[in-house]
Amino acid sequence: MKVVLLADVKNLGKKGDVVEVAQGYARNYLLPRGLATEATEGMMKQLAQRQATAVRKRQQEEERAKALAARLNGLTVKVYGKAGEGGKLFGSINNKDIAEALQKEYGIEIDKRKIILKEPIKQLGTYPLQVRLYPLVEAQLKVSVLAE
């Protein structure tokens, strides 16, 4: 019996997959628990529409990410921190500080988790960073840490 999974089922498939299962398994386990529905012609058309919509949405998100990456490439963001002698900062500069400076300086809002920073910055200077906006879409950004 062919069924369309409505939820992820361990050792069977993920949500939206069309799988062939034993009739008893479908009738006694999958259907009563709402984990699957019978794969009728109408259900298959509905599934195809959902998949097409999801593909279009992913393409739009990727295009937006590419446009943002083109805008970000080569930008230098200035972040200010209190510094002592020798250019050592009191505290450190982290992803959140960089995201806030980017928002304030250029009006570009980026989730702090997308900024890849191996460790917090603790010295004055200019540092290259990567911003991962979408899988396989990255931008190069420079952070200039200056004393207040």
Image: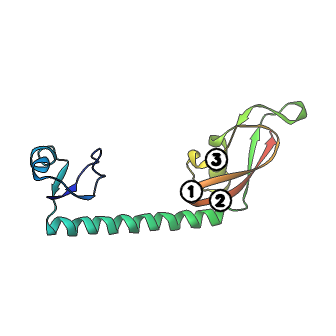
- Residue shown at 90% from the left, 33% from the top: 86
Considering only vertical position in the picture, is 85 above or below 43?
Answer: above
Q: Mark 3 near mark 1, Cβ–Cβ under 8 Å? A: no
As measured in the structure, the alpha-carbon distance from the residue carrying label 2 to the one carrying label 1 is 8 Å
Amino acid at pointer 1 = Leu
Amino acid at pointer 2 = Ala
- Residue shown at 65% from the left, 51% from the top: 102
Q: Is mark 1 on a helix, strand or loop?
A: strand
Mark closer to the chain start, 3 or 2: 3
- Residue shown at 16% from the left, 47% from the top: 30
Q: How is the image coloured?
A: rainbow
Q: Position of residue 5 (x, y in %)?
A: 23, 54
Considering only vertical position in the picture, is 23 above or below 88?
Answer: below
As measured in the structure, the alpha-carbon distance from the residue carrying label 3 to the one carrying label 1 is 10 Å
- Residue shown at 21% from the left, 70% from the top: 45
Mark closer to the chain start, 3 or 1: 3
Considering only vertical position in the picture, is 22 above or below 69?
Answer: above
Residue where numbered disc 3 is placed: 116
123, 27: nearer the viewer = 27
6 with respect to 40 (left or right): right
Any mark on residue 133, and which?
Answer: 1
